[in-house]
Image (cartoon, helix red, strand yellow):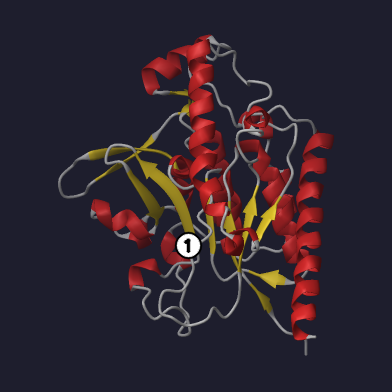
């Protein structure tokens, strides 16, 4: 009987480059892996939410094929190019509404029988003994509370707002996680008891690649590995790759803001990646030539990016097996 292959999975954020991460997940699934727990940031949170439901490689591809990429940057009223973006930026703090991607995910999750985090509870008697009940979920997504200057790991941190994690919608958490500053309108969370509102933006501002999310803290060895999928380049050489062509005509000030956002997304995690034990469990997908906001990507380019991720994941597993085989030998 074949050994069951398990791994926890952490997916980095990176806008349209997330198609490369999707391909990597497809490759892992095709190689027989299942994922007890999944974490993701920004676009990584979208794929993570779908994977947490237990979908297979074929089903995951079908879902993402239904995503109309060009509709993701959804203009608000009056619906005029540049005019709508400008009004939204200064009136609602983000060029696009972000409603299309949220509604798309909510529908796809509903078809899979998932609405709230209650349905993604993770019950495993062999898991970390130090892991409290409020952190026992199959899915964790990262968001940033800029009102209080803190990282939110949802659903874990809903209790900071006196909210029951089980009752919160998965699609709402993911939408919060992918609120790229100035690109999508930010979300908000309201403390149930005090009424205080917090502004929530992209989790990548504070933790875009939280590969240590599921590491044990009880002193026991992990029963299976954690794989991370990375889609952003190292800085400073790679910064020009993140916005090769702006989706919106930006002023010099907003171009600077894009660079600040890119540095926030990559800088902290790049320091973390210098540790050999982190690099060793990271699948780094090359997304050269694809920017974070390249939502006009054509069908062939999309397929090529997904295939690059798939190929990279399979090659990663080949090297991993070779390394483990040499250690046993």
- The foreground one among 303 and 151 is 151
What residue appears at the point 45 percent right and 50 percent down from the top-left corner?
A: 142
In the image, 205: left or right of 111? Answer: left
Secondary element at image label 1: loop
**In the rendered image, which quarter is residue 57 located in?**
bottom right
Residue 64, given in percent of the width and then of the height, sits at 69, 47
- The foreground one among 212 and 299 is 212
What residue appears at the point 61 percent right and 61 percent down from the top-left corner?
A: 276
What residue appears at the point 71 percent right and 64 percent down from the top-left corner?
A: 56
Q: In which quadrant of the rendered image does the C terminus lie?
A: bottom right
- The foreground one among 153 and 260 is 260
Residue 170, given in percent of the width and then of the height, sits at 46, 53
Residue 260, given in percent of the width and then of the height, sits at 48, 28
Can the viewer see residue 107? no
Residue sitting at the far bottom = 1
What residue appears at the point 81 percent right and 35 percent down from the top-left corner?
A: 301
Residue sitting at the far left = 194
Q: In which quadrant of the rendered image does the N terminus lie?
A: bottom right
- Above or below — where is 105 with respect to 70? below
Numbered circles on residues, count: 1
- Above or below — where is 264 with respect to 311? above
Can the viewer see residue 276? yes
Q: Rate crowding at label 1 as few (under 14), some (14 to 19) or many (20 or more) other CA atoms within 10 Å.
A: some
In the image, 294: left or right of 146? Answer: right
Q: Which residue is mark 1?
A: 213
Residue 156, given in percent of the width and then of the height, sits at 37, 60
């Amino acid at each position: 009987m074949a050994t069951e292959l398990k791994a926890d999975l952490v997916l980095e954020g990176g806008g349209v480059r997330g198609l490369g991460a999707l391909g990597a997940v497809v490759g892992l699934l095709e190689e027989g892996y299942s994922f007890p727990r999944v974490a993701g940031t920004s676009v990584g949170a979208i794929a993570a939410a779908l994977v947490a439901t237990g979908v297979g490689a074929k089903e995951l591809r079908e879902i993402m094929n239904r995503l109309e990429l060009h509709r993701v940057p959804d203009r608000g009223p009056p619906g005029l190019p540049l005019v709508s973006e400008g009004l939204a930026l200064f009136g609602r703090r983000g060029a696009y509404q972000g409603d299309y991607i949220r509604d798309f995910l909510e529908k796809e999750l509903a078809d899979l029988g998932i609405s709230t985090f209650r349905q993604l509870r993770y019950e495993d008697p062999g898991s970390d003994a130090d892991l409290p009940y409020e952190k026992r979920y199959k899915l964790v997504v990262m968001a940033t509370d800029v009102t209080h200057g803190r990282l939110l790991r949802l659903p874990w941190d809903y209790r900071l707002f006196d909210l029951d994690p089980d009752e919160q919608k998965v699609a709402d958490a993911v939408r919060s996680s992918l609120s790229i500053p100035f690109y999508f309108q930010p979300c908000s969370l309201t403390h149930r008891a005090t009424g205080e509102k917090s502004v929530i933006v992209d989790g990548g501002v504070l933790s875009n690649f939280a590969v240590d999310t599921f590491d044990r803290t009880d002193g026991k060895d992990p029963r299976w590995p954690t794989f991370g999928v990375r889609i952003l380049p190292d800085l400073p050489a790679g910064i020009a790759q993140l916005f090769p062509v702006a989706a919106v005509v930006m002023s010099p000030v907003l171009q600077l803001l894009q660079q600040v956002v890119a540095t926030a997304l990559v800088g902290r995690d790049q320091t973390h990646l210098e540790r050999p034990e982190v690099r060793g469990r990271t699948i780094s997908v090359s997304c050269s030539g694809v920017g974070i906001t390249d939502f006009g990507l054509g069908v062939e380019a999309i397929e090529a990016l997904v295939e690059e991720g798939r190929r990279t994941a399979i090659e990663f597993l080949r090297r991993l097996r070779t390394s483990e085989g040499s250690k046993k030998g």
